[in-house]
Amino acid sequence: MNAGVVPLFTAKRLSPDKVASQARLFASSPAAGVLDRLPLGVAVCNITRQIVYSNEKFRELTAGDAEAQTLIGQRLGEAFSCLGAGLEVGGCGTSELCRSCGMARALAESLAGGDMAQGECSLARQDGNKLDSLDFRIWIWAMAYGGEMFHAAILTDIRAEKRLLLMERIFYHDILNMVSGMRGICEIMREEKECAHNTEVELLAFAAERVNDLILSQRDFSLAEHGEYEVTPVKMGTLSLLTDVTGLMRREPSARGKELRIDPECLDAYFASDRKLVTRILVNMQKNALEAVKPGQTVTVGCDGDGGHVRFWVNNPGVVPEAARPQIFRRAFSTKGAGRGLGTYGMKLFAENYLEGEVGFTSDADAGTLFFLRLPAAVGLAGK
């Protein structure tokens, strides 16, 4: 449901004869033939919000898969049997519940003469003996025909999307609680004298930390894709950050038998950004580079800058195949096989949508492959 409220609509309706006349008029319009073939639900309303046209997909969404003629004259909430539509004699749009309805908000914007309005709407209805809920994404725009003004509404069912999002949030909450318990047990074991220098306990604690980091990374990735990640900028040092990340990555299985070194000319300067996101991008860059080289080869990391920006980079001697280069940041693409492909996409998503930065790469046989993250030295960051 959209944030905010809308003023209540008037209960006024046009006469049945007038609405029937408008329905015949719109049915004769060229638009009706186009809307009939859309794979999305479409309803067209008059200035008193009464339906004068609906396509088959819209009728499939209504309670009981209503017939087209029975919907003529009804309002959108009434067509869906919304519980809020029956709270007042005036029907849909006239109860207090309607003040926070996303569908009402979009319709109000269209009636006020705005451009295409959009939003989300959640409503509850009684479907036989059970309570049912509907979730829509809705777009509404005004259209004139035959001297009459109409408002076309396109609705897409997002129930599956909403349920998946809820399941994701419950999953992340529950599994993070479980991992937190594991980390707590590891800390208790560390305090025991006989475990104080136990290698197995240290490995278990490290594994618990890594699992926790991976879960948080996936949760933040999900939030970022939905535009809900909240950026927290802090001041940090480039060399200090690189040292921490590189120290962590040297303990990764992908680093065995390989050298991971920090360039001696690495810039040591302060900058402001979201430490968690920058760390995740650098971890992904180093991980990808380590996976791309063979035992005995070296991955070099560093940082430089131009005063207004800092640029982190990771270089390895391998070469990205020509055919793969245009797809390297595509969501599901990976050169490492099925089930991969979120690393480079996630780097670009976080950097360019949330950090006001840039992620890119160069690759050739002489210089190898270099991935970089370029960031403003200081910004008032705001998630997009």
Image (spheres, rainbow, N blue to C red):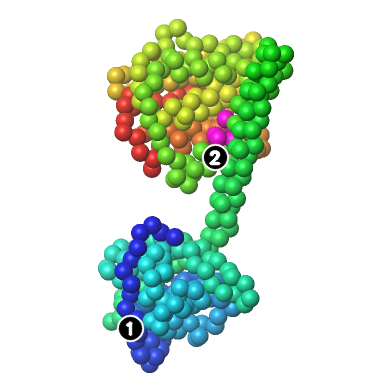
Residue shown at the point (53%, 24%) measured from the top left: 283
The quadrant where residue 45 appears:
bottom left
**Circle 2 sits in a helix, a strand or a loop, which is it?**
helix
Instruction: Tell me the residue that label 2 is attached to.
Output: 219
Q: In the displayed structure, would residue 61 be above or below residue 237?
A: below
Secondary structure mostly seen in magenta is helix
Q: Is residue 2 visible?
A: yes
Q: Is residue 215 magenta?
A: yes
Residue 271, position in %: x, y?
A: 35, 22
The quadrant where residue 15 appears:
bottom left
Q: Is residue 27 visible?
A: no
Quadrant position of the N terminus in the picture: bottom left
Q: Nearer the viewer, residue 226 or 365?
A: 226
Residue shown at the point (52%, 69%) measured from the top left: 124
Instruction: Tell me the residue that label 1 is attached to.
Output: 12
**Labelled pair 2, 1 in contact (Cβ < 8 Å):** no
Q: Which portion, as a residue range, is magenta?
A: 213-217
Tag 2: residue type?
Arg
Residue shown at the point (52%, 32%) measured from the top left: 344
Left or right of residue 281, residue 202 in this image: right
Residue 70, position in %: x, y?
A: 50, 85
Q: In the displayed structure, would residue 58 be above or below residue 160?
A: below
Q: In the displayed structure, would residue 334 be above or below residue 28?
A: above
Residue shown at the point (51%, 82%) measured from the top left: 68
Residue 98, position in %: x, y?
A: 40, 70
Tag 1: residue type?
Lys
Earlier in the chain: of badge 2 and badge 1, it is 1
- Residue 281, numbered circle: none
Q: Nearer the viewer, residue 13 or 205?
A: 205
Residue 371, position in %: x, y?
A: 48, 24
